[in-house]
Amino acid sequence: MATTVDSGNQYDRAEEVKRFDDSKIGVKGLVDSGLTTIPRIFVHPPETLSDLKPKPKPKSVAIPTIDLSGTRSTVVEQVAAASRSFGFFQIVNHGIPVQVLDRMIASIRAFHELPTDVKARFYSRDAGTGVSFISNVDLFHSKAASWRDTLQIRLGPTLAELEHIPEVCRDEVVQWNLHSTTLGEQLMGLLSEGLGLDKDTIKNTTCLDARVMVGHYYPCCPQPDLTVGIASHTDPGVLTLLLQDHTGGLQIKHEGEWVDVKPVHGALVINIADILQIMSNDEYKSVEHRVLANPSEEARVSIAVFFNPSAREALYGPFAELTSPEKPAHYRQFIYNDYMRRFFTKELDGKTLTNFYKL
């Protein structure tokens, strides 16, 4: 991160970023201080900001909503079609009571609205305990920071020690882990069958085991036209399960245009991640998505569970059953640890790593 000069004033971005991180107050702390303009480290470059302005849409596009209570053959067909065309879909009648969803959102909101000094005890970029509170996972790699804070908790293969999980959300996280694991297994079965494979194919690659939860908090931004809630990116794992509140702001890229993912109370958002696009040999799509900076007085809350392989030194690539002389593999094999190392040493910039492994 280089020192830059502007209007005769020296601006050391690296120093400003370090000062913000060392303060351990997060974006919520900045808002609580009463600022009316965002610090320069959060201002995104013109090419990002120009893409935030809504463009007239010739027709309204919505990601598919799938009722999981339908017949299995119908649900498999709908899940596969959505994964091929959008890479995102919402699910209803998924078996998790709406009260559980509401309590989960409330508990993550409660953590982020704790006194700053209480949250500071959890602030760390070393997730050795399996629990950490941070602002911007890519803070030291990105050209500009984004307007959000995050509570990250390891769910699997073993849940973080209960004593390390904040008490204000501990019981809810334990319940959420059980529900999301069961649902994740169901979804992997549907996605496997959608590829014409045995229902346990994706699960058997250890993709259900390594699970990480992030509870994002997007406070009101005084200048939402100058920054984002989370920059455009694709997810690096296999599958992502997202619970979002009623605020909105999530967008996906579909056919070159940004499409709003409108919140549906009681629904969950599912998206295909990079590793599953690779394993499906491009049958399923991992697509760019982002969150706009929140202009509302009420903070936006979302909780994502990332499903990743636990066999980190194993080789991954397209499933052999999906390749043939007529349809050769689109990707070379790679070690998952190498893939993740590349992801976490770059900024969230919309550039999927799948292209790095293309044949």
Image (cartoon, rainbow, N blue to C red):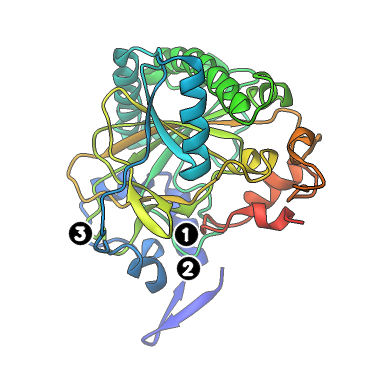
Q: Amino acid at mark 1?
A: Val
Q: Earlier in the sequence, mark 3 or mark 1?
A: 1
State which quadrant residue 309 falls in.
top right
Callout 1: 10 Å neighbours few (<14), some, many (20+)? some
Location of the N terminus by quadrant is bottom right
Instruction: Judge whether 316 appears above or below 355 on screen.
Output: above
- Numbered mark located on residue 13 in the image: 2
- Numbered mark located on residue 36 in the image: 3
What residue is drawn where x is 46% and y is 29%? 78
Q: In the image shown, does 129 or 265 lie closer to the viewer?
A: 265
Query: Where residue 177 sits: x, y (%)?
Result: 50, 17
Query: Where residue 72 sits: x, y (%)?
Result: 50, 16
Classify mark 1: helix, strand or loop.
Answer: helix
Residue 135 left/right relative to 54: right
Classify mark 3: helix, strand or loop.
Answer: loop
Q: In the image shown, does 153 or 9 lie closer to the viewer?
A: 153
- Numbered mark located on residue 138 in the image: none
What residue is drawn where x is 70% and y is 57%? 356
Q: Earlier in the sequence, mark 3 or mark 2?
A: 2
State which quadrant residue 161 falls in.
top right
| Distance of label 3 from label 2 (alpha carbons) | 20 Å
Judging by the rendered image, the residue that carries numbered circle 1 is: 17
Residue 241 left/right relative to 102: right
Q: In the image shown, does 280 or 221 lie closer to the viewer?
A: 280
Callout 3: 10 Å neighbours few (<14), some, many (20+)? few
State the residue lying farthest toward the front: 326
Location of the C terminus by quadrant is bottom right
Query: Where residue 175 sits: x, y (%)?
Result: 44, 12
